[in-house]
Image: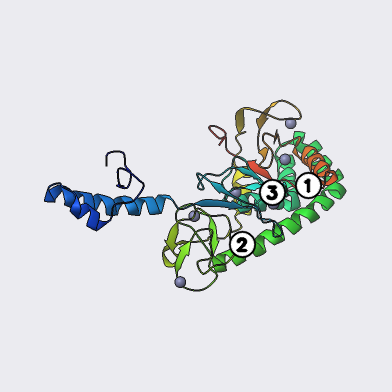
Amino acid sequence: MNSGEVLTCALCNYQLQDGDINQLRVSRNQKRKFHEYQIQKTFANFVNNARGIIKCPNRDCKWVVEVRNPNERFRVKCNACSNEFCSICNQQYHYRSNCQEVPQITQRWFVWCNTERGNYWKIRAQQDASCRAQLDDYEKQQGANAKRNEELRRRYEELKADEELKAKTCRLCPHCKRVVQHMGGCSSMICGQNYHGGDQQSGCGKNFDWDQALPYIPIVNTVQEQMKSALENQQRVVHTGIRCKNCHKEIEGIRFDCIHCHSLNYCEICEQRCTLAHSEELRRQKKQQHVFRLVTTPEASHK
Ligand SMILES: [Zn+2]
Ligand SMILES: [Zn+2]
Ligand SMILES: [Zn+2]
Ligand SMILES: [Zn+2]
Ligand SMILES: [Zn+2]
Ligand SMILES: [Zn+2]
């Protein structure tokens, strides 16, 4: 009883039933304690043994693996189709951001490339003549930007449609915060399984009640306000200790951090050309486009 196990027979693994406990030659009080212990332990074992399952999100792929800690976010590589994905949100694996932040970061990057980069340099050039060169460069790159913006637009439209669908049909598992869809039936759910026998999906395997689960909150567009406050902040922000991969200077102003690369930061001067080159390289390798996170206030340490 001290080892934290369910009480079993000393000779085999037979779990003691209530009747067996009554047969034990111990005091009444002791028996009652055994009964209570047994019930509590059996229940705890049942709950803790809920199995975490990770399934490859590729529709045609059947690869599943059992994991010890399903609440942890890590990079998964499918052994069957070599797809790489985030263990929680199933998307392309992302660094220095949690799953809930990714839609917002993607939206901001899209709006930056589409309109805000131009607005930013127009305003900066008015405030400071030395930014003129940057604005000229922006205008020169219009053609190259248009191609990438088209790809980003597609990604962004998909994201928006997905967000609307999730807000309508999904909630968050209270244990692992995965987005779970309710396929109909009663409100008793097992994370990762359709309760009434459906497709296996990634999940922590724990029980929860649909009616008590948190709603999925879709992203709202706050990019304009964020940009305004970044521009109004006349003080130059310094990202201490973080260097631009291109010019190797300590980054000042807006920092651009690729959430899909292990470590890749650019300063606002190098950002346009370097992120275009990054896009070009990914396109050449037939890989999904990466998303850069705009960091306008210095962060204490890398998440
Ligand atoms: Zn796969
Ligand atoms: Zn994720
Ligand atoms: Zn049911
Ligand atoms: Zn869960
Ligand atoms: Zn730079
Ligand atoms: Zn990248």
Residue hosting label 1: 287
Residue hosting label 2: 163
Name which residue type carries label 2: Glu
Mark 3 and mark 2 in contact? Answer it, CB < 8 Å: no
Answer with left or right where residue 119 lies relative to residue 95.
Answer: right
Answer with left or right where residue 282 lies relative to residue 220.
Answer: right
Query: Where is 236 relative to 231, above or below?
Result: above
- Residue at mark 1 to residue at mark 3: CA–CA distance: 18 Å
Residue hosting label 3: 109
Answer with left or right where residue 2 lies relative to residue 78.
Answer: left
Point out residue 293 in the picture as x, y percentages from the top left corner.
65, 43
How are the residues colored? rainbow
Foreground residue among 256 and 284: 284
- Name, please, the residue furthest toward the bottom: 185
Would residue 197 be visible to someone looking at this image? yes
User: Which numbered disc, 2 or 1, marks the residue closer to the eye?
Assistant: 1
Q: Local crowd at mark 1 within 10 Å, few (<14), some, or many (≥20)?
A: few
Point out residue 203 in the picture as x, y percentages from the top left corner.
53, 55
